[in-house]
């Protein structure tokens, strides 16, 4: 019995010794973050005050495809026209760039947290005075 | 006999312990007092507001490596962290001692992780200012000091703050403390609120001092912000004081002089109750007035009405003069 145990241990050791470190890292590679789909606002804060239940945000939707977005504006947002977008890093995005047809680029901090098993996008911006900061939390509709 | 002796010993021991504890507290204590404040009642917008605090610090024990902390309660639009210059002279230092804004988020000593502005607001308040656009800005002395025990220090704090062009009436406030004890006990700090300070600037008066029928939040905004219009029907006697449904009747004035009227009584204009005789409505002015993309709003004029639209209340408490709000940033 003792011999079998020793033999098993050695076998496992030999098997693992054949693995390259890169192989392990390969399996743990961070996935590419995809935000394609239509997103709605589930939380909105202005200068620290929660406006979610005080203002009708239900009419706003933004749809991301591979490289373009369509925005259905009925609330203040960083862009008012449809256009293209990209993330600064497909695996570890910290910035999102909105580019409008008139060649304006808006750069925003990009947060992509998982809350209760659901991915959210959190964007903070100032559509009016720069002293007024708005943080919208988006959740995918479909 | 032995029992009686033990009882007396125990009693004396307890009394000694209490006396020692009280003595230790007294020895460790120090006090900070703002004796007087030199400050004008008003200035013109854009000028530099100057005030001088005359402070006495009394120590009973030696305290090492301590920084002076001075906080000022000011309108946010002054951006005091960047526009204030604070320094002091004292009876134990040579020359002018500079102070620098405490970095945002820095925990105050013995403050359970809260930063200075939050801790001061929780413990001392905001001086009775009635609008939300105020802030505490905290400053530390650049140097730390070793202060001997059983001495009285005279400290003169000089504060200069470049004001904005805004037309403001505000209750300024001051707090003086130090970096070791923080606000952990009332003897370690002192606060003072010298009354209403007036800045004669441009635009609508932003009055933090006196209750008003209508206020707007944020104080500064553009037509692409979400703007909250508040109505406090209990401030003065008015025709809407006892109404159970209040509506907004507004006129938008564009930068090129066009006017857009929106005066109806439905769900899009109805105010939400915020308490007894207090009401508010949140509007996105561009959407509210259905503004074309190439237009911008310069200001709005508005009344509050009853459900029929016939009873109006404006800035004078009746229907004669509308409230006005000008869109602008700092």
Image (cartoon, grey):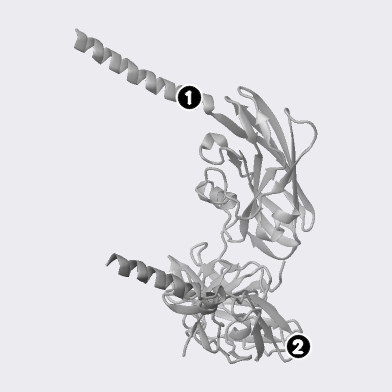
Residue most extreme to the top? B1
In which quadrant is the N terminus of chain A drawn? bottom left
Quickly name the residue at label 1: B24
Q: Residues within 10 Å of mark 2 (few under 14, many from 20)?
A: few
Residue at x 61% of width, y 30% of height: B63
Q: Residues within 10 Å of mark 1 (few under 14, many from 20)?
A: few
Q: Is residue B311 visible?
A: no
Q: Badges 1 and 2: C-beta atoms under 8 Å apart?
A: no
Quickly name the residue at label 2: A103
Q: Is A33 in front, or is B1?
A: A33
At which x and y percent is residue B70? 66, 43
Q: Secondary structure at mark 1?
A: helix
Residue most extreme to the front? A3
Residue at x 64% of width, y 36% of height: B66
Picture quadrant where residue B159 is located: top right
Q: Across the whole image, how many numbered discs are drawn on residues?
A: 2
At which x and y percent is residue A121? 54, 78
Specify the label residue A139 is tagged with: none
């Amino acid at each position: 019995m003792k011999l079998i145990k020793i033999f098993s241990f050695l076998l496992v050791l030999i098997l693992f010794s054949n693995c390259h470190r890169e192989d392990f890292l390969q399996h743990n590679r961070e996935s590419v973050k995809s935000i394609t789909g239509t997103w709605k606002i589930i939380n909105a804060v202005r200068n620290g005050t929660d406006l979610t239940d005080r203002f009708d945000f239900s009419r706003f939707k933004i749809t991301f495809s591979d490289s373009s977005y369509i925005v259905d504006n009925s609330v203040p947002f960083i862009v008012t026209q449809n256009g293209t977008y990209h993330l600064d890093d497909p695996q570890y995005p910290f910035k999102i760039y909105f580019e409008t047809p008139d060649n304006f680029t808006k750069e925003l901090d990009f947060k992509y947290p998982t809350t209760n098993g659901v991915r959210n996008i959190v964007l903070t911006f100032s559509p009016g005075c720069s002293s007024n900061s708005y943080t919208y939390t988006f959740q995918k509709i479909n | 006999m032995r029992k009686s002796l033990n009882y007396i010993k125990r009693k004396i021991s307890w009394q000694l312990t209490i006396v020692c504890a009280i003595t230790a507290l007294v020895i460790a204590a120090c006090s900070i007092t703002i004796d007087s404040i030199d400050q004008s009642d008003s200035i013109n917008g854009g000028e530099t507001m100057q005030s001088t605090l005359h402070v006495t610090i009394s120590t009973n024990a030696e305290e090492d490596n301590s920084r002076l902390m001075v906080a000022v309660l000011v309108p946010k639009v002054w951006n005091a962290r960047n526009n204030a210059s604070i320094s002091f002279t004292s009876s134990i230092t040579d020359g002018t001692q500079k102070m620098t804004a405490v970095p945002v988020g820095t925990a105050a000593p013995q403050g359970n992780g809260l930063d200075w502005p939050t801790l001061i607001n929780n413990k001392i308040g905001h001086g009775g200012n009635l609008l939300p656009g105020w802030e505490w800005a905290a400053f530390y002395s650049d140097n730390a000091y070793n202060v001997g025990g059983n001495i009285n220090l005279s400290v003169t704090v000089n504060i200069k703050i470049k004001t904005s062009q805004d037309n403001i009436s505000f209750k300024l406030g001051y707090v003086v403390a130090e970096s070791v004890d923080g606000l952990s006990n009332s003897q370690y700090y002192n606060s003072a609120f010298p009354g209403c300070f007036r800045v004669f600037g441009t635009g609508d008066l932003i009055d933090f001092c006196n209750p008003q029928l209508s206020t707007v939040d944020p104080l500064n905004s553009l037509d692409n912000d979400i703007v909250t219009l508040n109505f406090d029907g209990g401030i003065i006697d008015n025709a809407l004081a006892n109404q159970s449904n209040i509506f907004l009747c507004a006129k938008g004035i564009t930068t090129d002089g066009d006017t857009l009227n929106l005066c109806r009584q439905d769900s899009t204009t109805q105010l939400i109750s915020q308490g007894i005789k207090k009401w508010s409505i949140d509007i996105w002015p561009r959407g509210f007035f259905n503004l074309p993309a190439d237009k911008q709003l310069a200001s709005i004029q508005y009344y509050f009405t009853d459900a029929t639209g016939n009873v109006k209340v404006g800035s004078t408490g009746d229907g004669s003069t509308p409230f006005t709000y000008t869109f602008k940033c700092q």
